[in-house]
Image (cartoon, rainbow, N blue to C red):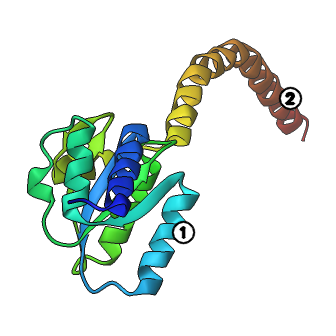
């Protein structure tokens, strides 16, 4: 018979799953409390949340949320990074942490907008530019035609200026 604490935990996990834009399920081994605390802080700064969970409770929460395809990931010690604001930033933080601690960290699966992801898909998501980078690229693309037009319109004037400068230099050379 489930205890009230476990029922509350499953309900809280289900709520996080339903609210999150993306999530990463990872296996961790031999990480110190300081390392997990540092990761938890970085994830929180990026708009996410880190939870160490029991697989059985996570499995019940996943079923309750109507998701499929994560059963294979519910083995071993599991840590979940939820992304509530930006779906990419907390995933990048988790991927960077995994690169620094390769022997102690393994991405098992993920979620994106209610769909299960494989470990390779989570890695691909981590390589997507951040929202700010994408907005900057779009702004650069939008500004590019205006910049090119300004250069084209200014070039004839610049040519006249260079021709006058060359003519002046030629006359100075002749006078000398």
Q: CA distance from mark 1 to mark 2?
A: 66 Å
Residue 49: where, in percent of width, then height? 47, 57
Where is residue 65, by image quadrant? top left
In the depicted structure, whether residue 131 falls above or below residue 155: below
Q: Is residue 161 left or right of residue 27?
A: right
Q: Quadrant of the C terminus?
A: top right
- Tell me the residue at 33%/84% (across/down): 31
Q: Residue furthest toward the left? A: 72
Name the residue at the front extreme: 1
Residue 10 locus on image (x, y percent):
32, 53
| Residue, disc 2 | 168
The answer to whether residue 73 is visible is: yes
Q: Nearer the viewer, residue 169 or 95?
A: 95
Point 52% across, 65% down: residue: 42
Where is residue 2 shown, x and y percent of the image?
25, 59
Q: Residue at x 8, y 55 (%)?
A: 72
Q: For mark 1, what is the residue?
A: 41
Badge 1 marks a residue whose secondary structure is helix
């Amino acid at each position: 018979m489930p205890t009230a604490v476990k029922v509350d935990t499953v309900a809280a996990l289900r709520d996080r799953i339903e609210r999150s834009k993306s999530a990463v399920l990872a296996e961790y081994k031999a990480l110190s409390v300081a390392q997990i605390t540092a990761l938890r802080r970085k994830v929180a700064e990026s708009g996410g949340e880190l939870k160490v969970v029991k697989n059985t409770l996570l499995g019940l929460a996943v079923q309750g949320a109507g998701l499929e395809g994560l059963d294979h990931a519910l083995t071993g010690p599991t840590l979940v990074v939820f992304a509530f604001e930006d779906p990419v930033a907390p995933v990048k933080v988790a991927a960077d942490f995994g690169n620094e601690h390769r022997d102690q960290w393994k991405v098992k699966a993920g979620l994106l907008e209610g769909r299960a992801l494989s470990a390779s898909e989570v890695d691909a998501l981590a390589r997507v530019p951040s929202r700010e980078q994408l907005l900057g690229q779009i702004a650069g693309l939008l500004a590019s035609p205006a910049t090119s037009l300004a250069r084209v319109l200014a070039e004839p004037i610049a040519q006249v200026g260079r021709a006058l400068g060359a003519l002046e230099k030629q006359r100075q050379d002749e006078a000398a």
